[in-house]
Image (spheres, rainbow, N blue to C red):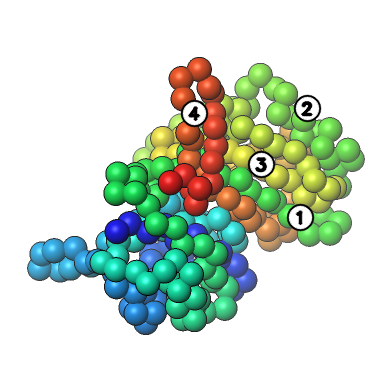
Amino acid sequence: MKVRIKFAKYGVMKFIGHLDTMRFFQKAIRRAGVDVKYSEGFSPHQIMSFAAPLGVGMESYGEYMDIEVLSMPSVEQMKHDLNQVMVEGVEILSVTPLPDQAKNAMASVAAASYRIQMKEGVFPVDDLNGKIQAFYGQETIPYTKETKRSVVELDLKQGIYEIHADTDETIQMLVNASSSGSIKPSMVLEKFCQFAGVDILPSAYQVTRLETYTDLAGEGVEHQFVPLAEAV
């Protein structure tokens, strides 16, 4: 049986990287007594798939992983048992059974929503939402992405589905999070700061992933984003 687990990661746990998060859950699943299924072969491991790795320093209330279990008393009991062995900064939000034909969490990701919260007084932009809409209204938003092996020219506009300011110090956005065109919120903020003529240090803001989505759009529909917990 396939099961999708939604969890939050915040506080000091935001400094724990993806590989250590995987190891934490492998141990937590054993401590919680989950009847998890293991792979076959000389080195069996828990059958587990995470949706989209979270960057170090980012918080999230929309993280997902899929596991396979041999048996399960109930979704509420599994949620309770897992939360009993969580550390401060990690919370199981929901447990959802999946049909056998469902794609795994990683293959299902299409988009993610984020909140960027500025520290008070560090972002002196008048009419923040107006500036953001002017920024988003550009025909293209070119971005140069440098890696160890290459330099890639991107158009961020293609991967930003929504962006607005909730307050004078809070920006929310919905961006592409698929494996083929993932856009980091820090990239969008960097280009916006250039557009607005302001500088901001990474220590002056907190990025939080609010939700992770799949796209159920059919023919003739551009996008139909649905949270992974509901895409069953």
Q: Whole-Å distance between the Cαs marked 3 and 1?
A: 14 Å
Give the labeled residue for mark 3: 173
N-term-proximal mark, 4 vs 1: 1
Q: Whole-Å distance between the Cαs marked 4 and 1?
A: 34 Å
Nearest the viewer among 25 and 93 is 93
N-term-proximal mark, 2 vs 1: 1
Q: Residue at x 48, y 35 (%)?
A: 215
Quadrant where the N terminus sits is: bottom left
Give the labeled residue for mark 1: 118
| Label 2 close to label 1 by CB (< 8 Å) | no
Amino acid identity at mark 3: Met
Amino acid identity at mark 4: Ala
| Label 4 close to label 1 by CB (< 8 Å) | no
Say which element carries label 3: strand
Give the labeled residue for mark 4: 217
Q: Nearer the viewer, mark 4 or mark 1?
A: 4
Residue 192 pos. (x, y %): 71, 37
Residue 43 pos. (x, y %): 15, 68
Q: Residues within 10 Å of mark 1 (few under 14, many from 20)?
A: some
